[in-house]
Image (cartoon, rainbow, N blue to C red):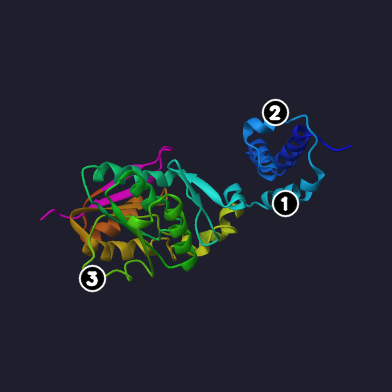
Amino acid sequence: MTDVLGQTWRVLRDRFATAGIETAALDARLLVRHVLDLDETGLIARESEPFPEQKRDDLEALAARRLAGEPMARIFGRQEFYGFTFGLNPATLIPRPETEMLVDFGLDVLKTESAAQILDLGTGTGCIVLSLLANLPGARGVGIDIAPAALDMANHNAKALGLSERFTTLGGDWFSPLEADARFDLIVSNPPYIASAVIETLAPGVRVFDPGAALDGGIDGLAPYRIIAAQGAGFLKPGGRLALEIGFDQAQMVKGILQDAGWQTISVYKDIAGHDRMVVARVSKA
C-alpha cells in the first residue's frame, strides 16, 4: 500500500532524527514539498493523499544527500539572506545570518550618501554588496573574487535582483584587479578566517560542502586580514570605512593587525549571540 504524504514526511523525519539532524521535521517537510512542488499549505491540504510512487526515487536521492550531511541550502541551491534569495554553487559559501551585520552597518553609514561606492572582497554569492545595493538605490558596487564560478553566481544573483547595471565583478586576489585610483566609501568582506589545521575538525556540512578556499585563512586564520589591513586604506575615500567579519575569538588579533597597519578609530561589534563578529575601521577625513 502506498504511503500517504503525511506518513511519508513523518517517516523521513524519523530517519533524519535518528541520524542526529536537529531540524529533522522541517527538513523532511521541505524535501517532500520540493519533490511535489508544493507550498506548506498545499502539503497540509494533501496530507491524506497517496505519495506518487514515480516521485519516490527523487525523494530518496535528496534524503540520501541530507543524511550525508549536505546542508539544505546546498541541496536546493539557494539561501535566504537579508530578505532576498541568493543562488549558490560549489564555489560559494552559504550566506549566514551573522553576516547580515555587515549589511546593517553599511546601510547605517551610507544612508546619507547619494551615490555611494562599495567594494566587496571575496564576494562569493554577492550577498553582502547586493543586499546593500538593493537598499541604496543610488549606490554602485564592485565584487572581487578569485573563483570564476563565484563571480558567475554573483552576476546571476545581481541579474535576478535587477541590480546588474549597478554591480561589477572583477576576478583576482583581493585588491589586485582594481585600478590604482579606485576609491570607495565602504569596503566590506567576510574573508576566509579558519586556521588551516582547524578545517578538518569542522562539521561535515562545512568541511565537506563549503569551498575550502573560502574557509582557509592560512596557518593562524589571519592571513587575509593582514592583506586587507595593509592595502585597504589606499582604496578608501577620506572618511571611508572598512567592515570585516571575524571569527568569534579573533577580535583583538584583527584589531591589532589594523592598528599595526596604521588604522585608527577601530571598533568591535558583537552578533546576536553575543560573540565578537565584526571589526570596523575608518580612515581619516583629512
Secondary structure under the numbered disc 2 in the rendered image:
helix
**Disc 3 element:** loop
| Circles 2 and 3: CB atoms closer than 8 Å | no
Q: Secondary structure at mark 1?
A: helix
Left of 163 or right of it: where is 208? right
Total marks shown come to 3
- Closer to us: mark 2 or mark 3? 2
Q: CA distance from mark 1 to mark 3?
A: 50 Å
Q: Which residue is mark 2?
A: 45
Q: Residue at x 25, y 42 (%)?
A: 111
**Nearer-the-camera pick, 150 or 195:** 150
Camera-side residue of 47 and 15:
47
Residue 270 forms part of the magenta stretch: yes
Q: Which residue is mark 1?
A: 64
| Disc with the residue nearer the chain's start (1 vs 2) | 2
- Residue segment shown in magenta: 267-286
Residue drawn 47% across the image and 47% down it: 96
Q: Quadrant of the C terminus?
A: bottom left
Name the residue type under label 1: Ala
Percent across and percent down for residue 167 are: 35, 57
Nearest the eye: 76 or 194: 76
Tell me the amino acid under the disc marked 3: Ala
Q: Is residue 216 visible?
A: no
Q: Which residue is label 3 attached to?
A: 180
Task: In the displayed orientation, state which residue is furthest to the left.
Answer: 286
The label shown at residue 161 is: none
Q: x%, y% of residue 206?
A: 56, 54
